[in-house]
Amino acid sequence: MMGKSQNILVIKTDGLAAFVAAEPLYEAIRTAHPGARISLLTQSHLQRVARASPYFDQVAAMPDFREAEAKKAFVEQVRNSHFSYIYDLAANEDAKRLYSALGLFRPKWRSVAPASRSARKKGAPEEGLPNTSKFSEAVGLQAVERLPDFRWALSSRKDAANMQPSWFGISGVYGLLMPGVDATRRWPAQQYADLSRLMAKKGVMPVMVGPKELHGFADEVAHAAPELVDLTGKADHLQLVSLAQTAAFFVSDAAEEVHLAVSVGCAGVLIRKAGEEHLTPKGRNVITLTTRERMDEAKPEFVWRALENMGLIPKGSANPRAAVR
């Protein structure tokens, strides 16, 4: 056990998939510093879900180091905080800039190994996910080997009206459609539209979620499938956790949001390009359908059959997963 009056800084500035995958590491740091004040430095869009966690006392976003005044003020703030340790769980360019800027005033800096050059070249966010054993070895803390669990996020705003599916006009049984932002790894809009119509025909409401960058793609899907409920850019990460927890299933391709959904027990189907099978979240109720050449080779009817075979299509008009929670 380490000192109780310490200030600790954790750096995690490398995206949603990596943020979710590192959840067991946050627990390890909190366990090692039970009485310390632990601050997290992350991306701006991850601040809300990070603040809901039981691991951090303060959450802030990394400033733009290209702005000289912002950089100077931030570095001075870090120095004045007198951190005993800085745990760099990103090992990316943002962290390197801060490391360099702190110079001789740098506290004890413990860093994970960065993603390999081949992983960075591939560009898939899932390639650089943290490894628990490597983390333990790199920073000298013992992290429990377990899957990320974000169920704590469900209690942060559980009584708020905007955490309920009805807030978004969702009722009855629904499934989440989660396209990725990378068009080269994304299931085509026509396939999502065909699946949406099939879902609606079978009494399952199709709900598309994702960042605002996907709104144009969702419009294309909705044009061919008016049954679609488009929530792209409308549901934050905490709301997504709540929606995933009561959804019958998800269907996705390369969306980082999948990691958040499966962390609360949502099951479903992933459509992947050949060679990306290893990127499927491990230890989860997830089936991967691999295409040989083109993403449109995965047919909506086959995706639906896979969901049925997994036992994820509820019988009747009520969602049994939601009823037992």
Image (cartoon, grey):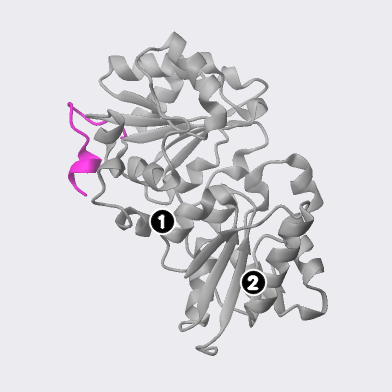
The relative height of residue 204 versus residue 9 in the rendered view (above or below) is above
- The residue at 42%/58% (across/down) is 149
Name the spot of residue 312 as percent of width and height, x first.
32, 34
- What residue lies at 54% left-to-right and 47% top-to-bottom? 45
SS under mark 1 = loop
- Residue 51: x and y, percent? 45, 60
Does any portion of residue 310 appear in the rendered image? no
Badge count? 2
Residue that mark 1 sits on: 150
Magenta part of the chain: 311-325
Depth check, front residue: 52 or 207: 52
Answer with left or right where residue 273 lies relative to residue 229: right
Quarter of the rendering containing residue 93: bottom right
- The x, y position of residue 70, in whole percent, is 71, 58
Q: Quadrant of residue 216?
A: top right
**Which residue is depicted at the point 23% across and 42% down?**
322
Identity of the amino acid at label 2? Tyr
Against 78, residue 173 (above or below) is above
In-front residue for pair 87/279? 87
Which of 208 and 9 lies nearest the eye of the viewer? 9
Please tell me the numbered disc located at residue 87.
Answer: 2
How far apart are labels 2 and 1 at the CA level? 21 Å
Majority secondary structure of magenta residues: loop
Q: Residues within 10 Å of mark 1 (few under 14, many from 20)?
A: many
Residue 296 percent coordinates (x, y): 58, 17
**Badge 1 amino acid:** Phe
